[in-house]
Image (tube, rainbow, N blue to C red):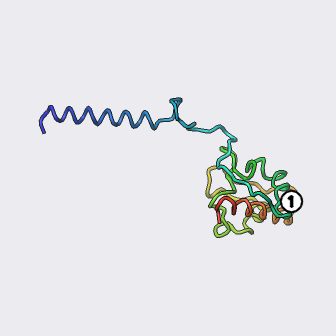
Amino acid sequence: MNKKNLATVTIVAAAVAAYFFRENAPGDHPGSAQADPPRGAAIVQVAMPATLSETARMGQRAFDAKCASCHGADAAGQKGVAPPLIHKIYEPGHHADMSFLMAAQRGVRSHHWPFGDMPPVEGVTDADVKMIVRYIREVQQVNGIF
């Protein structure tokens, strides 16, 4: 390849690379998504069921009282705070219902997410957790988790 062709190829490659990086870099250009949502922003979008069973409705109230401050509204998680529970990681085949009970009672060491360890949940009963799990499972199902 002669010097003229090499220079042309180099210039074209540099232009393509510059265009790619400009279009894919976070920023304020039109069509750009916010690159880094603020702390506390929902991590996932959650579709809610049209109706919940009575047990799940009670679980939703318990979740809102004991869990939502960390795991967010509708269990969507909060950036920089806690993970979403409406996520494939928490499907029954990977995190059985008992794992939620154990996490509430004993806390849990961080193992899937970079949020740190979860402490035990004060003032939540086994019955509360069972209703919370029913709520989470019904919402997961609507969101195609299982």
Question: 142 or 109, which lies in front?
Answer: 142
What percent of the width, then of the height, locates residue 141?
A: 69, 63
- The residue that appears at 80% across and 61% down in the rendered structure is 52
Q: Is residue 19 left or right of residue 128?
A: left
- The residue that appears at 41% across and 36% down in the rendered structure is 21
What percent of the width, then of the height, locates residue 107?
A: 75, 59
Q: Is residue 27 left or right of residue 43?
A: left
Question: 125 or 36, which lies in front?
Answer: 36
Which corner quadrant holds the C terminus? bottom right
- The residue that appears at 55% across and 37% down in the rendered structure is 33
Residue hosting label 1? 58
Dot 1: what SS? Answer: helix
Q: Is residue 129 left or right of residue 8?
A: right
Question: 140 or 83, which lies in front?
Answer: 140
What percent of the width, then of the height, locates residue 12?
A: 27, 34
Q: Quadrant of residue 111?
A: bottom right
Disc 1 residue type?
A: Met
What percent of the width, then of the height, locates residue 140?
A: 69, 61
Q: Is residue 111 above or below residue 44?
A: below
Q: What is the residue that sits farthest to the front in this orientation?
A: 50
Q: Quadrant of residue 100?
A: bottom right
